[in-house]
């Protein structure tokens, strides 16, 4: 467990890999979800019609006294707490957390997901993430006021649904252009909207890192949701301001669309930002359709 929390150095600790390249998840199967992890002691992978043959039998799960759904408030309260524990653990590990279709709010992956359902799922995941960070901030004076930004995307075929809080961003890349999907929750973003600053002035403003909304600083937070239609070979890029502050949109477009390989695109973007002396966290994820 400790090795997984610190980024799996036993796997990613050699000279050619960085531990921050690791991807972390608690449950990663559409037939045995995070809800199942705290509801069943044995595999109940029946929904795909394969008579429970699919998936592994060695699931490290627990039912907390009742196999399957329960109307016992004590059992359900414990299961809910364990889901939050798993989710909090996921958020505090090194690397990229992988959140599977609303597992963290005890939902399962089903066919026929609509944009409205995807937006509701992302809002629910944000609510849980905000609660996890806020509760942690109450445990010690060392954590008082801590918070983070968030950007997440759900993609299905030709549709992407994005949610963001703070100044972490989502970009849509076509073969010819790049478009910012999200809107920063920052002081300079509002000043630009009011016509008090230009985009170029905002990049140099001393308050450019002052955000007006964050995950975990208050008991509740609201995220903005956006939808985006995708075509073949288009991409969605998620990043922290450590990247967007160091690279112009057109520079990112060149690396994403015209670079040598999509597989190492994120690493190239990270190297560029770091070589320019990025003073902040630099995080980037690319999803290609």
Image (cartoon, helix red, strand yellow):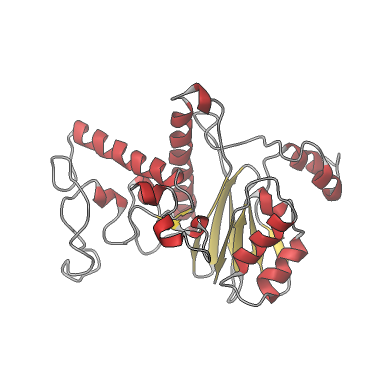
- The spot of residue 155 in percent (x, y) is 50, 63
Q: Nearer the viewer, residue 268 or 195?
A: 268
User: In front: 272, or 106?
Assistant: 272
Most extreme residue toward the front, as rendered?
A: 15
Q: Which one is nearer the viewer's eye here, 3 or 103?
A: 3
Q: For residue 246, which quarter of the picture?
A: bottom right
191 relative position to 243: left or right: right
For the point 41% across and 61% down, which residue is it? 11
Indicate the position of residue 238 as horizontal and vertical percent values.
60, 57
Please state, as top left, top right, bottom left or bottom right, where the C terminus lies in the image. bottom right
Q: How many marks?
A: 0
Residue 172 appears anywhere in the view = yes
Q: Name the residue rendered at 73%, 70% in the picture.
A: 254
Q: Is residue 232 above or below residue 56?
A: below
Residue 158's place in the image compared with 106, above or below, is below
Apparent side of residue 149 relative to residue 55 in the rendered image (left or right): right
Which residue is pictured at 21% across the width and 50% down the height? Answer: 61
As displayed, is residue 189 above or below residue 18? Answer: above
Q: Quadrant of residue 201?
A: top right
91 sits left or right of 183 in the view: left
- Classify residue 23 as left or right of residue 193: left
Q: Does any portion of residue 174 appear in the rendered image?
A: no
Picture coordinates of residue 60, whole percent (x, y): 22, 52
Give the image location of residue 236, x and y in percent.
60, 63
């Amino acid at each position: 467990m400790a090795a997984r929390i610190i980024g799996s150095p036993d796997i990613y600790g050699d000279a050619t890999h960085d531990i921050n390249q690791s991807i972390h998840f608690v449950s990663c199967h559409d037939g045995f979800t995070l809800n199942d992890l705290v509801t069943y002691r044995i595999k109940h992978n029946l929904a795909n019609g394969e008579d429970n043959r699919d998936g592994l039998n060695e699931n490290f799960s627990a039912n907390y006294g009742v196999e399957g759904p329960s109307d016992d408030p004590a059992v359900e309260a414990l299961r809910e707490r364990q889901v939050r524990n798993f989710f909090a653990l996921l958020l505090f590990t090194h690397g990229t957390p992988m959140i599977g279709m609303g597992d963290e709010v005890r939902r399962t992956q089903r066919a026929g997901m609509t944009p409205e359902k995807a937006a509701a799922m992302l809002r629910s995941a944000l609510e849980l993430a905000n609660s996890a960070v806020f509760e942690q901030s109450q445990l010690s004076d060392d954590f008082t006021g801590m918070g983070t930004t968030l950007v997440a995307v759900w993609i299905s075929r030709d549709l992407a649904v994005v949610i963001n809080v703070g100044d972490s961003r989502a970009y849509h890349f076509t073969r010819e252009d790049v478009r910012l999907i999200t809107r920063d929750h920052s002081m300079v973003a509002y000043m630009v909207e009011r016509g008090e600053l230009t985009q170029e002035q905002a990049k140099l403003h001393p308050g450019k890192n002052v955000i007006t909304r964050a995950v975990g600083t208050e008991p509740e937070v609201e995220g903005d949701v956006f939808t985006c239609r995708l075509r073949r070979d288009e991409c969605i890029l998620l990043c922290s301001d450590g990247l967007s502050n160091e690279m112009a949109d057109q520079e990112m477009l060149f690396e994403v669309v015209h670079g040598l390989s999509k597989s190492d695109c994120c690493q190239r973007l990270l190297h560029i930002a770091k070589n320019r002396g990025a003073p902040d966290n630099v995080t980037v994820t690319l999803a290609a359709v």
